[in-house]
Amino acid sequence: MGMNVAAAGGSGDPEVLVDINTTPLIDVLLVLLIMLIITIPIQLHSVNMNMPVGTPPPPTTPPEVVRIDIDPAGTVLWNGEALADADALESRLTTVAALESPPELHVNPDKRVAYKSVATVMAAVQRKGLTKVGLIGAEQFL
């Protein structure tokens, strides 16, 4: 029969092991990994696409562009022609908005122009319901 022998220190208490046995945990994780690998469907390396059939649409002509420049003094230029005042801009925008296919508006403010002048032009464009608008010339601020 066995007999407990105390350590040389004489305390009499056996040492407690605080290590966690990770073998069952690793076994469970490996089983879960294998189950995951088995249940993943086989992926195809090709993509099936339903392409349209028929004749392609005819090439479209480039849209008409109206260039609205604003010089440092706040003068508005319509395709290079100076407009007298805000009413002249409003009448031009009204004419353009009434067209079946309105042109694109390219607003190009000078970098030294007051923000008020640019905001006035943009507000007039918005009031007329024109949506094809772009601010041109951001590269001048770089």
Image (cartoon, grey):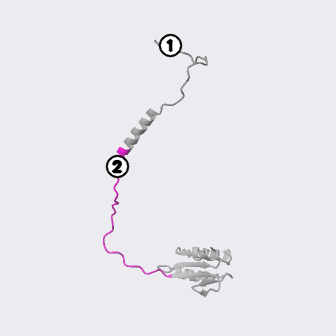
The magenta stretch spans which residues? 37-64
Amino acid on which disc 2 is placed:
Pro
Whether residue 89 is situated above or below residue 131 in the rendered picture: below
List x then y, in percent, for residue 71: 65, 82
Whether residue 45 is situated above or below residue 91 in the rendered picture: above
As drawn, the residue found furthest toward the top would be: 1
Predominant secondary structure in magenta? loop
Number of numbered labels in the structure image? 2
Which residue is at 52% across, 75% downward? 132
Whether residue 128 is visible to the viewer of this picture, yes or no, is no
As drawn, the residue found furthest toward the left would be: 54
* Camera-side residue of 76 and 96: 76
Q: Residue 3 carries which label?
A: 1
Q: Which mark is residue 119?
A: none
Amino acid on which disc 1 is placed:
Met
At mark 2, the secondary structure is loop
Q: Residues within 10 Å of mark 2 (few under 14, many from 20)?
A: few
Q: Measure the alpha-carbon separation of dots 2 and 1.
A: 60 Å
Sequence-first tag of 2 and 1: 1
Q: Residues within 10 Å of mark 1 (few under 14, many from 20)?
A: few
At mark 1, the secondary structure is loop
Q: Mark 2 points at which residue?
A: 41
Left or right of residue 84, residue 4 in this image: left
